[in-house]
């Protein structure tokens, strides 16, 4: 219960450890004096002021400020002290007001350490005074009480101190003002356009008024900022903290005086607004800025990195387009000029033709080298960016050899995208762009196990390609399982001939599959029927507008069907079901991953063409078949393979399996 | 300071402090002229389109217009098609941003054109202008006024061409007729 004091009124104090909050519309000096029974101050060491901010049981701030918090521990005050007078004074010199009558009435409140007010007092009726005794804490029959004084002094601090019979009143007053002036000189000026002044209504959070010449961080010198924390009530704590002791200013419930109010939850740092993007250090003159990971827009670091990677992708596509366009133009111009030189009859005589041809070639070379220079500059910048971005990527975006996979934990949230591999262009072989695809997948994947000329010219045989294809599929499936929260992603495997047992071992042995790989025509039919039914049910529920009305037993997690060795073991009915899943599945969370050779399935005729078109074709070996959305370059795709000999896949899958087991329980 | 350009006038895009321009915007703004008479409040909508054609040695290499908003190299960007104009009431209704530093080395001229896609002549357009703005500080470098134009549906506004190490801009203002930039190609070639 707060007591609103009037002048002369007193009020008992419930406890010895208190804070006195001062709030004035303008910077004021706050101090306190320790007096005996008669109010006499015995020496300058009984006055706490900005030049000597701490006394036993008493601490004031070192600067003039619009808001102050004075810490008081009455138990620590010497026994000879019977009165603690809290005084305020206007700083002399400077541009501040010259009298209290010109400013809003100062307000003082006595609070306990939790911020609950005990008493409050607004010092009204001041006119020409420049110093005022605001409050008096005094002993009465062994207990402490507070009295509202409000005694002003037109003669300022010197008169005030002299009134308390301090012999060196004038010298002390001068030294106080000197200390304040040097404190003001130290502090930075307040920003010119301050927020509208919030008057402290309850005194719980002292705030800075406009124009407060106080640094926004802390009005207290860090050395002395040892407001006793609420965490250790009853534990006596010395107020005279030595220099260098860590400041206790991190108390969240009481923002330091003079600073803007922080409305955010002190311990909930992750709530909106998004953290600011990492600051890009200023570029050295003449050189491009050093890249920083996450230097893109987005609400989270993940989104920023995603946008940054796509930005790098677009930049590389466009800068390569500029290079290719310039080279094409240079070549066509050279051909044209050579043709002209050839058709010009004059060139047949003497060396004119040779000179023309030479000129054409050198013009071509000049332009190409210029274009190359620009490309190299841009690629170097992108390489530098990739070097900082790649290590910063979260698991879903990271390569398998990124250390982040060794610190893998089963996530709680679905990531926004998944890395399906790397992309690069022949002109910029040094840089690999992560191929990030948004989750949930919008289309199925087709791992092409067909015979294809790999880029290094060696032809892998079909058996080897099939094995590589399934290995790639396993790596993709494992990554999908790993980046989804436990139980939100289910993988089914169809391996009709059982030929993929070796490659599928990581999935089977770790126990992350919903069921062992289905074998034979019957197994294929059973899995397809189950998934088709799930698609039908979810579609019906969605169309009826009742997605909650699914019958029990329907697995609502995302489903991935890995089909090995298509088309072996598939009849027409199964093929049709597969097409249905490819078309309708992604919308209701059923995805397809085919490991198939298109030529082998040619027996089904053009029936399957729409199926291939609806799937995203990936290859188990590097192959240039993916086009970017801006310019349409053919990008070389590299699958995300686990480094040879690494156990990271097994380790990750073991964690996924453990999480699935504990989740299913 | 804005230069009000006249037909054929050329200005260098070197900045007054010696540095060359890095990024410019060609802005196009217009309003439909109100019709008189019955139903006079029903202004007919006019769709003007700004286009930029990138030339390498008098051969068109790339074009930026409402169906291809970004040049393949990314240096020239159209901010999007505006079908009615007048939204800015004096501001740019369509704009093409050119990052001069990123323009491919073989591109030596960029020609800006304006077409009336809906077929009205410039007589029916009010307050039409084309201006070139230094995108880095928003300063207007040059302004060319279209209003009071004649009975033609297109105009070749200006060209930005390489001059020494930097770029220069030339106001052209040649009237032409055509629905999109393709129709203007014969008219553009003589001004290159």
Image (tube, coloured by chain):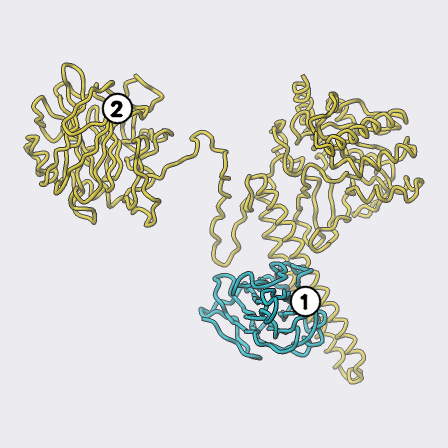
Chain colours: A yellow, B cyan
Q: Residues within 10 Å of mark 1 (few under 14, many from 20)?
A: some
- Badge 2 element: strand
In the image, residue A377 sits, relative to residue A237, either above or below, namely below
Residue A90: numbered disc: none
Residue at left 78%, top 43%?
A617
Q: Which residue is mark 1?
A: B117
Q: Is residue A452 left or right of residue A644?
A: right
Does residue A488 appear left or right of residue B138 in this picture?
right
Q: Where does residue A648 sit, x and y in percent of width and height? A: 68, 29
Q: Are marks 1 and 2 in contact (CB under 8 Å)?
A: no
Query: Residue reaching furthest front?
Result: B38
Quickly name the residue at label 2.
Answer: A118
The image quadrant that residue A81 belongs to is top left
Query: At which x and y percent is residue A229?
Result: 33, 24
Q: Position of residue A607 (x, y in %)?
A: 90, 42
Number of labels in the image equals 2
Q: Quadrant of residue A451?
A: top right
């Amino acid at each position: 219960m707060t007591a609103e004091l009037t002048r002369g009124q007193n009020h008992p104090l419930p406890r010895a450890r208190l804070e006195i909050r001062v709030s004035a519309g303008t910077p004021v000096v706050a101090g306190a004096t320790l007096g005996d029974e008669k109010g006499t101050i015995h020496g300058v060491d009984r006055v706490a002021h900005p030049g000597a901010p701490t006394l036993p049981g008493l601490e004031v701030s070192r600067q003039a400020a619009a808001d102050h918090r004075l810490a008081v521990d009455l138990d620590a005050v010497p026994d000879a002290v019977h009165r603690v007078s809290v005084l305020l004074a206007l700083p002399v010199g400077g541009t501040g007001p010259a009298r209290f009558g010109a400013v809003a009435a100062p307000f003082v409140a006595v609070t306990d350490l939790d911020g609950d007010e005990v008493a409050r007092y607004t010092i009204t009726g001041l006119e020409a005074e420049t110093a005022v005794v605001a409050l008096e804490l005094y002993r009465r029959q062994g207990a402490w009480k507070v009295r509202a004084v409000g005694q002003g002094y037109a003669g300022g601090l010197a008169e005030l101190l002299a009134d308390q019979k301090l012999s060196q009143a004038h010298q002390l007053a001068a030294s106080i003002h000197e200390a304040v002036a040097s404190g003001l000189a130290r502090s930075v000026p307040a920003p010119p356009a301050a927020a509208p002044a919030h008057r402290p209504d309850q005194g719980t959070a002292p705030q800075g008024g406009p124009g407060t010449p106080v640094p926004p961080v802390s009005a207290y010198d860090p050395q002395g900022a040892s407001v006793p924390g609420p965490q250790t009530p009853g534990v006596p704590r010395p107020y005279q903290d030595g220099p260098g002791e860590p400041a206790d200013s991190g108390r969240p419930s009481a923002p330091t005086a003079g600073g803007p109010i922080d409305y955010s939850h002190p311990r909930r740092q992750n709530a909106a607004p998004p953290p600011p993007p990492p600051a890009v250090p200023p570029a050295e003159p003449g050189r491009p800025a050093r890249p920083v990971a996450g230097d893109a827009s987005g609400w989270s670091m993940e989104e920023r990195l995603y946008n940054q990677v796509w930005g790098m992708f677009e930049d590389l596509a466009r800068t390569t387009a500029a290079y290719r366009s310039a080279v094409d133009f240079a070549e066509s111009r050279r051909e044209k000029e050579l043709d002209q030189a050839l058709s010009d009859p004059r060139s047949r005589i003497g060396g004119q033709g040779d000179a023309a041809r030479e000129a054409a070639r050198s013009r071509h070379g000049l332009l190409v080298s210029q274009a190359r220079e620009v490309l190299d500059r841009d690629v170097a910048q992108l390489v530098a960016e990739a070097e900082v971005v790649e290590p910063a990527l979260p698991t879903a975006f990271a390569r398998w050899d990124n250390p982040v996979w060794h610190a893998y934990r089963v996530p709680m949230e679905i990531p926004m995208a998944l890395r399906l591999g790397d992309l690069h262009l022949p002109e910029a072989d040094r840089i690999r762009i992560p191929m990030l695809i948004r989750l949930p997948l919008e289309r199925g994947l087709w791992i092409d196990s067909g015979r294809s000329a790999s880029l290094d010219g060696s032809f892998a045989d079909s058996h080897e390609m099939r094995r590589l294809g399934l290995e790639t599929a396993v790596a993709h499936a494992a990554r999908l399982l790993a980046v989804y929260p436990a139980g939100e992603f289910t993988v089914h495997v169809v391996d009709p001939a059982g030929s993929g047992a070796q490659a599928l071992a990581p999935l089977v042995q770790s126990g992350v599959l919903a069921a062992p790989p289905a074998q034979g025509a019957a197994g294929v039919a059973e899995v397809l029927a189950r998934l088709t039914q799930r698609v039908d049910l979810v579609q019906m529920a969605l169309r009826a507008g009742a997605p909650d009305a699914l019958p029990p037993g329907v697995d609502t997690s995302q489903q991935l069907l890995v089909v090995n060795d298509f088309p072996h073991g598939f009849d027409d009915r199964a093929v049709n079901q597969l097409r249905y899943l490819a078309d309708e599945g992604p919308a209701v969370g059923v995805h397809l991953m085919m490991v198939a050779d298109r030529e082998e399935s040619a027996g089904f005729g053009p029936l399957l063409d729409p199926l291939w078109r609806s799937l995203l074709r990936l290859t188990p070996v590097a192959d240039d078949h993916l086009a970017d959305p801006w310019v349409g370059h053919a990008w070389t795709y590299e699958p995300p393979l686990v480094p040879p000999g690494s156990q990271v896949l097994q380790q990750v899958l073991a964690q996924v399996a453990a999480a699935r087991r504990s989740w299913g329980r | 300071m804005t230069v009000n350009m006249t037909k054929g006038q050329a200005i260098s895009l070197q900045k007054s402090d010696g540095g060359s321009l890095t990024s410019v915007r060609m802005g196009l703004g217009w309003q439909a002229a109100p019709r008189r008479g019955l139903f006079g409040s029903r202004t007919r909508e006019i769709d003007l389109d700004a286009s930029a054609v990138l030339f390498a040695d008098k051969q068109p290499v790339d074009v930026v217009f409402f169906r291809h908003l970004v040049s393949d190299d990314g240096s020239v960007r159209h901010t999007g098609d505006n079908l009615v104009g007048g939204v800015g009431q004096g501001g740019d209704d369509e704009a093409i941003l050119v990052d001069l530093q990123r323009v491919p080395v073989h591109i030596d001229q960029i020609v800006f054109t304006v077409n009336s896609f809906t077929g009205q002549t410039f007589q029916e357009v009010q307050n039409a202008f084309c201006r070139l703005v230094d995108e880095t500080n928003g300063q207007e470098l040059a302004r060319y006024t279209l209003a009071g134009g004649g009975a033609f549906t297109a105009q070749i506004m200006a060209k930005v061409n390489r001059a020494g190490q930097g770029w220069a801009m030339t106001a052209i203002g040649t009237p032409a007729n055509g629905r999109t930039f393709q129709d203007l190609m014969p008219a553009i070639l003589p001004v290159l």
